[in-house]
Image (tube, helix red, strand yellow):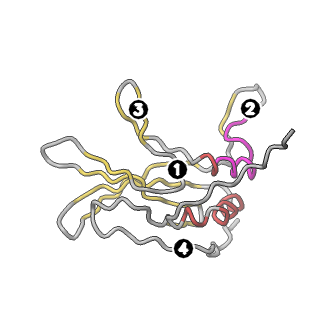
Amino acid sequence: MTTPALQPAPTLSAPAHTDATAIHAVPARLRPWGFEVLVLREFRPADAPPAFARIEQHLLRAPERLNRHGVSFALALRPEIVSALTGLVGRPSQRDAADRPIRNPLWPALTWQARPYDWPDGTRTTEWWAQARFPTFAPWDALRRQFAPALAGHGAPCPSPSPEPQP
């Protein structure tokens, strides 16, 4: 079974980073299986603990999570994207035949990808990209079209909830 060709969605283009201290959103990299988006930039000086810059983006929640042991980094889609995916493929978790909770296999897998980067000024960083891999093309294609501005590095408006009936 072949994956359909990825057709371009209408997008606006955000500028790429030209220096290591930039944190503005940049376009996600669209792939046939999903997308990659720059989330963190790690600076690792020789004589100090690493420092992280959170890159603005409009697809995932802020990655840092405070816990009683310090800071951890996790990947989670923004609520409006979770809502859209739930409408397309169901809830993120399901129940198996024994009524145990299991992961919905139609949801994208979110993983980290680290890539070293050498800047023109000699700075070396590690760029931390989040990858969202969809197991089937249709939900990825629908999400890509609905959230094209966010994928392009621009703030996507949250879908408006249905108005509540007034008494």
Label 4 and label 1: CA atoms lie apart by 19 Å
Separation of residues labelled 1 and 2 (CA atoms): 26 Å
Please tell me whether residue 126 is drawn above or below residue 166 in the rendered image.
below
Residue 103 screen position, x and y as percent? 65, 38
- Name the residue at 17% across, 65% down: 122
Magenta stretch, overall SS: helix
State the image quarter where residue 17 is shown.
Answer: bottom left
Q: Which residue is mark 3?
A: 66
Task: Please tell me which residue is depicted at 57% across the width and 48% down the height of the picture.
Answer: 78
Q: Is residue 116 above or below residue 12?
A: above
Earlier residue among tags 2 and 3: 3
The disc label shown at residue 95, or none: 2
Q: Is residue 40 left or right of residue 165?
A: left
| Three-letter code, disc 4 | Leu
Mark 1 residue element: loop
- Mark before the other along the chain sequence, 1 or 2: 1
Q: Are marks 1 and 2 in contact (CB under 8 Å)?
A: no
Q: Is 90 in front, or is 101?
A: 90
| Mark with earlier residue (4, 1) | 4
The range drawn in magenta is 82-94
Left or right: residue 139 compared with residue 109: right
SS at badge 2: strand
Q: Residues within 10 Å of mark 4 (few under 14, many from 20)?
A: some
Residue matched to label 1: 60
Residue 93 percent coordinates (x, y): 68, 37
Can you say which quadrant of the picture contains the N terminus? bottom right
Look at label 3 and name its amino acid.
Leu
Mark 2 vs mark 4, CA separation in Å = 40 Å
